[in-house]
């Protein structure tokens, strides 16, 4: 137990102030990250929707071929490299282990986020790990590496596990299908109505490579959008954690200030009592009148 003296409490108040400065800085960085990744996620989701519309045209024109999915299974997990995000990586771990229990098979595992890779390494075999993007500009390079890793494997069944942003709570863990594109999915895409009435879209290129090019673009965009949403959820979780920490620091400081004032007052009272007692001991007693 630390000594409950005014000097000791004052030192603890200085430590609380230093911690508050760090939390304020982390809160500002998290808020800036939320703005950045929120804009990037909105743009990525909108572009994914536009790519799906182009896929619908290609599907109606019969340019999308459904490949045979006879390979093994793989999972891409989007985690975080940094801490101060609560149970962000732990929720991904629980979702992944639950999926492994249901399927009973160990898939190839590509992990985004070194901290998550270390968390999963004791229980699962991590095929490869990647650094989480610290800015929207770095996400494109990450997605290219992931697609190259998936393409170089024999995996035709690939799922995405990520924390996606919501209103309350700040994120929810999802397991999303990524590959293969089934015949039912192609029919669903082809049945979608064009968003603008009275406009008949046309495909300029109708060669066999057009559908393949659109599909490759959709794979990149879908993976990129999931990455942006995961990063947005991470920064929102960190911002919420910093807000909770700031609230706790304010309450802690108020408690310490009250303790310091009480101890200081007790010290002053004790000094006054000692002064009065010393004065009374030095002054001779006045004799009683006859």
Image (cartoon, rainbow, N blue to C red):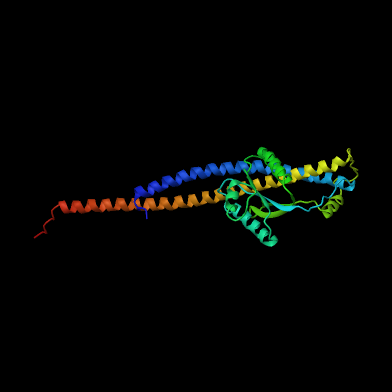
Number of callouts in the render? 0
Q: Which residue is more in the foreground, 99 or 26? A: 99
- Is 147 situated above or below 125? above
Residue 218, x across and y down, in percent = 78, 44
> Is residue 45 visible from the viewing direction of this image?
no
Residue at image location 42% in from the left, 45% down from the top = 14
Q: Quadrant of the C terminus?
A: bottom left
Q: Quadrant of the N terminus?
A: bottom left
Residue at image location 55% in from the left, 43% down from the top = 26
* Residue at the extreme left: 290
Residue at image location 32% in from the left, 53% down from the top = 266
- Is 18 situated above or below 183? above
Residue 284, x across and y down, in percent = 13, 53
Residue 167 as seen in the image, left or right of residue 48: left
Q: Which residue is more in the foreground, 68 or 177? A: 68
Residue 31, x across and y down, in percent = 60, 43
Q: Which residue is more in the foreground, 282 or 106? A: 106
> Is residue 207 visible from the viewing direction of this image?
yes
Q: Which residue is more in the foreground, 155 or 272? A: 155
Where residue 140 sits, quadrant-wise, is: top right
Residue 51 as seen in the image, left or right of residue 143: right
Residue 213, x across and y down, in percent = 81, 41
């Amino acid at each position: 137990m630390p000594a409950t003296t005014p000097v000791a409490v004052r030192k603890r108040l200085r430590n609380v102030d230093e911690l508050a400065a760090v939390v304020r800085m982390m809160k500002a960085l998290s808020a800036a990250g939320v703005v950045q990744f929120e804009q990037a996620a909105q743009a990525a989701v909108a572009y994914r929707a536009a790519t799906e519309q182009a896929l619908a045209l290609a599907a109606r024109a019969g340019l999308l071929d459904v490949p045979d999915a006879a390979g093994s299974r793989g999972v891409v997990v989007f985690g975080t490299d940094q801490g101060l995000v609560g149970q962000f990586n732990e929720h991904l771990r629980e979702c992944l282990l639950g999926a492994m229990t249901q399927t009973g098979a160990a898939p190839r595992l590509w992990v985004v986020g070194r901290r998550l890779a270390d968390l999963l390494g004791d229980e699962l075999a991590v095929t490869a790990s990647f650094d989480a993007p610290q800015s929207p500009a770095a996400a494109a390079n990450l997605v290219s590496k992931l697609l190259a890793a998936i393409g170089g494997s024999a995996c035709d069944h690939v799922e995405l596990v990520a924390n996606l942003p919501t209103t309350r709570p700040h994120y929810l863990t999802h397991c999303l299908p990524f590959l293969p594109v089934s015949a039912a999915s192609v029919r669903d895409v082809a049945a979608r109505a064009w968003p603008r009435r009275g406009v008949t879209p046309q495909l300029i290129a109708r060669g066999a490579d057009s559908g393949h090019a659109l599909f490759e673009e959709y794979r990149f965009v879908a993976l990129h959008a999931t990455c942006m949403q995961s990063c947005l959820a991470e920064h929102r979780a960190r911002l919420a954690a910093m807000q909770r920490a700031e609230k706790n620091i304010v309450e802690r400081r108020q408690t310490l200030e009250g303790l310091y004032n009480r101890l200081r007052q007790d010290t002053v009272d004790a000094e006054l009592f000692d002064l009065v007692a010393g004065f009374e001991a030095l002054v001779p007693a006045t004799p009683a009148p006859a």
